[in-house]
Amino acid sequence: MARGEDEGGSLDMLLDTLCNTFGGIILIALLLALSVNKKSVELYEKLVKTDDNESELIREREQLKNSLLDLQDEHVEVIEDLEDDADQMREEIEEIKDNLDDLNSDASAVEELAKREREKVENLREAEKMEEEERLSLEEQVSRLETILEHQELSQELKKKPYRKVSLPQQKDTKKKPLPVIVAHGKMYPLIKFGIGKTMKNEEGLTWNQTADKRFQIKVDPSKGVDPEDDQNLENFLSSVRDAPRKVRQDFFLNLFVFSDSESFGVFNKIRDEAVLRDLDYNWLPISELPLMMKADNVPWKIQ
């Protein structure tokens, strides 16, 4: 009995073990089924999403393809426009080259023309220079001939006139004071006049200016002065010089400054001759310019 009970308990334990094992297997199978089902759902969802993404990618690819085609079309149009512009620019460049060639040809022609004109100008200048030299030579010849003719005419005139022998004054010492007289423009201009007991500066026909270096500048007025051709005027002047010792107690001699004009020398000759007739001494100095400049030391005695 005991053995049978032992065998029955072992069987129960085996059955329990088998049941437990079978239950575990069923549980594992159920868990695997559930797990596979979940994975299948996830995989299905992934597949659905993949299909959606693929469709989106296809659409994007189509859009990109269309954009690429549009860009290619635009690129072709741009290239065609650029080629047209390049052709036009090449034509313009050729036209500019042609114009430059024409300009170079024109410039060469202008330069050649300018060269010929410069040569003409140089030839004209040379001809003008030669003409000027010839003119000067002719003028010199004419002047020489005129001089010769004038000398011949003067010689003939001198031959017609009687000669007059002129003797120069003899220099001698004197205690007399000089009485300056300017002889110019056919007149005489005494620088002093006699008062009662004194000599005075004569301002009739004369302008006196004193310079910074204490010299006198004496100008004459051609419209005034004493006319020696008037015998009475000359007599009055020479008489006043002769009578000066009684008026101013001083003897004078005539100091004649003779200007180099055409009338002055003839007037000087008359004054000299009349002075000699009256026993008046004289001296004369030729001058080539007016006004007369005199140092203060040479101004007549007691000129006021």
Image: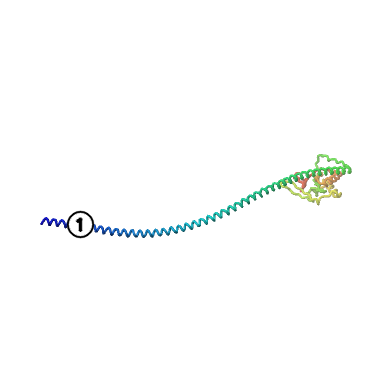
Q: Nearer the viewer, residue 254 or 23?
A: 23
Q: In screen coordinates, is 265 left or right of 44?
A: right
User: Percent position (x, y) of residue 215?
Assistant: 74, 46
Vertical comparison of 59 with 235: above or below? below
Q: Nearer the viewer, residue 152 or 181?
A: 152
Mark 1 nearby-residue class (10 Å; few <14, some 14–19, many ≥20): few
Vertical comparison of 65 with 271: above or below? below
Q: In screen coordinates, is 116 left or right of 3?
A: right
Q: Nearer the viewer, residue 24 or 241?
A: 24
Q: Is residue 285 visible?
A: no
Quick one: which residue is furthest to the left in this view? 1
User: Percent position (x, y) of residue 290?
Assistant: 77, 47
Q: Which residue is mark 1?
A: 18
Image quadrant containing the N terminus: bottom left
> Considering the numbered disc 1 on the image, is that residue within a helix, a strand or a loop?
helix
- State the count of labels: 1
Which residue type does callout 1 highlight? Leu
Q: Is residue 18 visible?
A: yes
- What color scheme is it? rainbow
Rendered residue at 20%/57% (across/down): 18
**Residue 174 picture quarter:** top right
Q: In screen coordinates, is 42 left or right of 228?
A: left
User: Percent position (x, y) of residue 77?
Assistant: 52, 57
User: Percent position (x, y) of residue 266?
Assistant: 84, 46
